[in-house]
């Protein structure tokens, strides 16, 4: 049954009129969402994706067949949009990323809110290394898979990062979006615009700790090898969403490996 077809005719006509005018479907979906018509909003995004201004995942089915892999949705949240995706990476892909990154790891850095430079900070106690898009075959395959899943161009993404968190390693509560109120925003958005979404991939199991926690939403995702976590940093209108505050909780037993991919609104150059 189509949720869109269940809408009153006046709303159906309103949607047709505005789609014909070229209004982005995500902005129209935002109006449906505000009315509580969540299924209709996501159906509209899925069926009218040619003029979308945001990444999205088709959540109409529990299993998603991609070109080279079938994945499944373990959990979704609607506001903000969050999805946990099982079986996104194979054990071999996880190990390949770990093996390539291990000898290249250096202290992780954060964006300085004053000038947009990258600096070390006590809030982020991990080591990491960054890659160019498609730098090695395994990364090229993963980036293409992410692009297919979230319906967003590969070129609209930063290079993949691989991170290692040892005992006590954490990333305290933070946002991934660039706050327009910060001085650094105009600097960091010159290359690709806003960070619309964050795609995390857990490369290892962790015996204790190391979850991704959303304190404003009162839940956390535990690390599991091969599982991915996607969350939108902006709402359907493209505005930053402060409900996306999140943290990497301290690892208390074992080692956590993680890969991160940030999705930008424009090509990242």
Image (cartoon, helix red, strand yellow):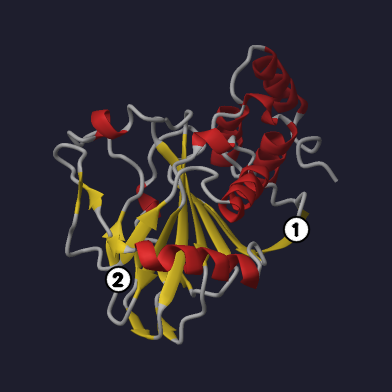
- 33 vs 148, left or right, is left
Task: Identify the residue under disc 1.
Answer: 69
Residue 238 position in % (x across, y down) = 45, 33
Residue 242 position in % (x across, y down) = 35, 48
Residue occupying image coordinates x 63% and y 72%: 91
Is the C-beta separation of discs 1 and 2 under 8 Å? no
First in residue order: circle 1 vs circle 2? 1
Q: Furthest residue to the left?
A: 114
Q: Nearer the viewer, mark 1 or mark 2?
A: 1
- Labelled disc at residue 181: none
Task: Identify the residue under disc 2.
Answer: 170
Q: Furthest residue to the front?
A: 103
Residue 268 seen in render: yes
In this view, 159 is above or below 164: above
How dense is the environment of label 2, judged by Cα within 10 Å: few (below 14), some, or many (20 and up)? many
Residue occupying image coordinates x 77% and y 26%: 9
Toward which corner of the image does residue 138 lie, by quadrant?
A: bottom right
Name the residue nearer the viewer: 78 or 258.
258
Where the C terminus falls, by quadrant? top left
In this view, 24 is above or below 196: above
Element class at badge 2: loop
Residue 75 seen in render: no
Number of numbered discs present? 2
How dense is the environment of label 1, judged by Cα within 10 Å: few (below 14), some, or many (20 and up)? few
Name the residue nearer the viewer: 208 or 103.
103
Residue 176 position in % (x across, y down) = 35, 49
- 33 vs 269, left or right, is right
Element class at badge 1: loop
Residue 159 position in % (x across, y down) = 45, 45
Name the residue nearer the viewer: 267 or 219.
267
């Amino acid at each position: 049954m189509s949720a869109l077809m269940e809408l009153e005719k006046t709303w159906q006509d309103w949607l047709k009129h505005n789609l014909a005018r070229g209004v982005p479907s995500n902005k129209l979906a935002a109006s449906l969402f505000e009315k509580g018509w969540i299924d209709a909003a996501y159906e509209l995004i899925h069926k009218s994706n040619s003029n979308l201004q945001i990444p999205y995942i088709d959540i109409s089915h529990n299993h998603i067949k991609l070109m080279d892999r079938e994945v499944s949705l373990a959990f979704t949240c609607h506001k903000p949009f969050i999805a946990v995706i099982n079986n996104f990476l194979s054990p071999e892909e996880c190990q390949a990323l770990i093996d390539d990154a291990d000898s290249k790891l250096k202290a992780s850095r954060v964006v300085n809110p004053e000038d947009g430079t990258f600096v070390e900070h006590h809030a982020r106690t991990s080591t990491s290394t960054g890659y160019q898009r498609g730098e090695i075959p395994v990364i090229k395959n993963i980036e293409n898979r992410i692009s297919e899943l979230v319906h967003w161009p590969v070129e609209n993404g930063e290079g993949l990062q691989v991170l290692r968190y040892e005992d006590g390693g954490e990333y305290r509560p933070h946002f991934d979006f660039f706050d327009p109120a910060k001085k650094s925003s105009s600097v960091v958005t010159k290359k690709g615009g806003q960070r619309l979404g964050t795609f995390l991939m857990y490369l290892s199991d962790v015996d204790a700790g190391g979850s991704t926690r959303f304190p404003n939403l009162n839940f956390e995702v535990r690390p599991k090898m091969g599982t991915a976590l996607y969350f939108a940093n902006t709402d359907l209108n493209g505005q930053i969403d402060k409900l996306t505050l999140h943290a990497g909780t301290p690892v208390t037993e074992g080692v956590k490996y993680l890969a991160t991919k940030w999705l930008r609104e424009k090509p990242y150059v």
